[in-house]
Amino acid sequence: MSLPAIHAATLFDKIWSRHVVAQESERFLLYVDRAVVDDVRAPHVLASLAKRGLPIRRPDLVFVVQDHTTPSFPTHRGLGGSDFLDATRAAAHAAGLTLFDVGDAEQGISHVTMPELGVVPPGSTYVCVDSHAPTVGGLGALGFGCGSSELEHVLATQTIWLKKPRQHRIRLDGALAEGVSAKDVILHVLRIVGREAMRGAAVEFCGDMIAREPIEGRLTISNMAVELGARTSLMAPDAAAMDWLAARHPQERSAELAGVRKVWSALRSDAGAAFETDLHFDCASVEPQITWGTSPSTAIPVTSKVPSAGDAHGLAADKWRRAIDYMDLTPGEPLLGKKVDRVFIGSCTNSRLPDLESAARVLRGRRVAQGVTAVVVPGSRTVARQAERAGLREIFVAAGFQWGEPGCSMCAGGGGERLQPGERVVSTTNRNFEGRQGAGVRTHLASPATAAAAAVCGVIADPRRLAPNS
């Protein structure tokens, strides 16, 4: 008698199959382990559920965060006093949900606080009305962004309807050179692969570069996989991930994490598992990157020149021209030496402790150039406390940076910041679309080290040329 064939499964397959509740044609009903509601959507979503008479099925698994509209500084409309924040506070209390409010010890950006609190352990599913929910893939959790109506369904049923996405794998190998970070790697990948190239897909990252990378760097790469068009992204959890969680999660989640420890080694793709595409990158040759256009995929090494239409890596000529005109650049000119008006270090992409440490190494003993406004916003109060204990806040403030309150801040022009048309910004955020940080604002995406170099030089600069001061 012949035995049935055993098919090799991907990491995504394993997590997905464990959460399937039902199937209807091509749609699957997936159980949701954790759901997060932010301050932009909470008032509407929670009010809609109450109006429809629908109770929240598992209020213990739902968390409300104040992040998108949190003022960067107390002087911006009064800390915690915006209409969105007040409405979110009232809605969360009325619904009996856990709220990470402005000023709370664990408040911050959802995609920063949820991993560091152990709320989204490896192998779990996570839903948030924010496109960068897949950030948690850096810990081996399956995150999905959703719309407000989908979130209502999640809160009422603890499930979500999804089509199973196709799968791609990106292998990242090679030791990173000095001055190169995870942000540079994912910008390099975006440049080669192209924005939206993996639209709607599940992307798994693997390779020895990932294995060596601190968890915070893995979260950065998973965060920006969304800019490839990915529906979600994943990395296999390892001992480093488990240790990272064990050192941070609250005591009340210790039992759950202990259970995950027993099975985490199985949370990886089987040998022979099939992917639609399997790409490989040698990261040892990657240099510090910066964007020149209005898409995250318009990245080039910081030492390169603005590309001509034919060198813009598949960007259509009309889009290239529009980007060039919007950014006020000339084909063939170097980006090095281009005057900047502002620098922002923060967002769910680059606001964790190692991000601040890499910027501080550049800033120590230096000052922000005259005419440059520089802002740093830790991703959570936990990160802020860690940075203060390590003396990083002192370094930033001594250099002339403004130290902001945890939240999304300038990522999408929020936090009370008002940027002017024509201003050129070097930003550690994940998107540089037209108007993203304000009407007519020209945004260059870069790593924290490159952003810090721009702040002290007053122009776009190569961080490798600024030797750390002792």
Image (cartoon, rainbow, N blue to C red):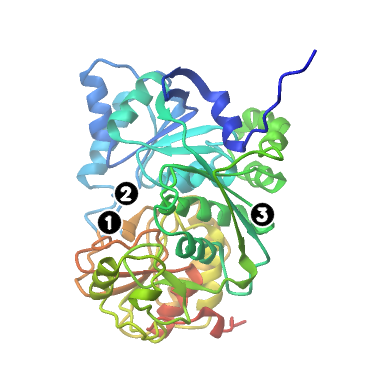
Instruction: List x then y, in percent, for residue 440.
Output: 20, 68
Q: Amino acid at mark 3?
A: Gly
Q: Quadrant of the N terminus?
A: top right
C-alpha distance separating marks 1 and 3: 36 Å
Where 69 falls versus 125 (above or below)?
A: below
From this viewpoint, is residue 72 visible?
no
Residue to which mark 3 is pinned: 207
Residue to which mark 2 is pinned: 68
Tell me if 155 is positioned left or right of 393 in this view: left
Which is closer to the viewer, label 1 or label 3? 3
C-alpha distance separating marks 2 and 1: 7 Å
Q: Quadrant of the C terminus?
A: bottom right
Tell me if 380 is positioned left or right of 408 in this view: right
**Proximity of marks 2 and 1: CB atoms separated by less than 8 Å:** yes
Instruction: List x then y, in percent, for residue 333.
Output: 36, 86
Near mark 1 (Cα within 10 A), the count class, few <14, some 14-19 or many ≥20, is many
Near mark 3 (Cα within 10 A), the count class, few <14, some 14-19 or many ≥20, is some
The residue at the far right in this view is: 1
Q: Amino acid at mark 2?
A: His
Q: What residue do we see at 70% from left, 34% from top?
A: 266
Q: Quadrant of residue 374?
A: bottom left
Residue to which mark 1 is pinned: 414
- Between discs 2 and 3, the one toward the N terminus: 2
Where 178 falls versus 337 (above or below)?
A: above
